[in-house]
Image (spheres, helix red, strand yellow):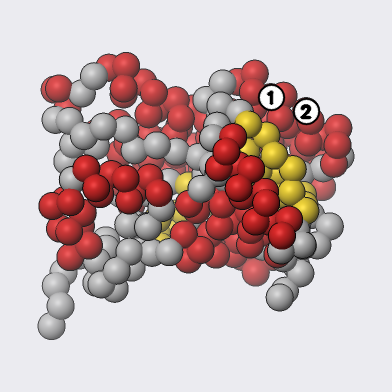
Amino acid sequence: MNKDFDGKVVLVTGAGSGIGRAAARLFAARGAAVYAADLNAQGLQETADLVREAGGKVRTAAIDVAREADVAALLVRIGDEAGRLDAAFNNAGITGGTYALQDYPAEDFDRVIAVNLRSVFLGMKYELPLLLRQGGTIVNTASVAAITGPGGMSAYAASKHGVQGLTRVAAMENAARGVRINAIAPGWTETPMVVANSAQNPAFAALAKQAIPAGRGAAPEEIAEAALWLSSGASSYVHGQLLVVDGGMTIGGFAL
């Protein structure tokens, strides 16, 4: 396997399952020393075990990415232990409940914004000083909900639109300083979070899958590969973009 991340230090949030776990494994397989962060300590340990079984290097941090003190402390730790940060994948997120906007509980809205949007702001705020030492990359996980308006998901859509806005501002501010910043927009992905939500609303899940021209949801590894590409030298001239990885879900139109 290509070892283009050999000697690099990479942070992955939401690494306890799904896309984050897949990314942690892929970064490590390509030579990176991975810092895996998640609120789910058990899932985090499972990810670490998988990375180590494959011969990879990983350290874990059980943190709440929406808490500034947690994020700041983790980046201080990375600076102290590794002395550098070469890539960050700000991937942690939740979907929140499904309600008509007028019925959306304010406290639920605030939690989705905190986990999905505030965390990306905090992540970049504390990652950038380390990244600017030698240059590097940030990839933020948005969603196809950053370019669409999924009914019942006002908090989620607002948070993911916000992620795209933050990404573009940060990319503009840092493009000439040696740090590239982009976002990915996954479509329907077979992660534990999505599987659990599908079980609660199987009719919606079936309808969503019918809307995917590729005829299936993504494997987490397929989304993680996009994040790795944006973190690698292969995308060296890509700044401030939203890379949609959705099996064609947002193409629009209709089949012949």
Name the residue: 64% across, 27% down. Answer: 71
Residue positioned most to the bottom: 256
Where is residue 205? Give x, y as percent: 21, 54
Image: 70 above or below 17: above
User: Does dot 2 land on a helix, a strand or a loop?
Assistant: helix
Any part of residue 248 in sight = no
Q: Residues within 10 Å of mark 1 (few under 14, many from 20)?
A: some
Question: How many marks are shown on the rendered structure?
Answer: 2
Q: With 189 as the anchor, is 30 left or right in this view?
A: right
Q: Secondary structure at mark 1?
A: helix
Residue type beneath disc 1: Ala
Q: Say which residue appears at 40% left-offset and 37% top-offset.
A: 94
Q: Say which residue appears at 14% left-offset and 72% top-offset.
A: 254
Residue behind mark 2: 76
Q: Position of residue 47 (x, y in %)?
A: 61, 50
From the image, tell me which residue sits under label 1.
Answer: 72
Question: Quarter of the image containing the N terminus?
Answer: bottom right
* Image quarter of residue 208: bottom left
Question: 176 or 151: nearer the eye?
Answer: 151
Looking at the picture, does residue 115 appear above or below residue 12? above
Looking at the figure, which quarter contains the C terminus? bottom left
Tell me what residue is drawn at x 59 percent, y 64 percent.
229
Residue 246, x across and y down, in percent: 35, 62
Residue 91 visible in the displayed image: yes
Badge 2: residue crowd in 10 Å (few <14, some 14–19, many ≥20): some
Marks 1 and 2 close (CB-CB < 8 Å)? yes
> Which residue is nearer to you in this view: 104 or 17?
17
| Residue 158 on image: x %, y % | 32, 34
In the picture, measured across the screen, residue 77 lies left or right of residue 167, that is: right
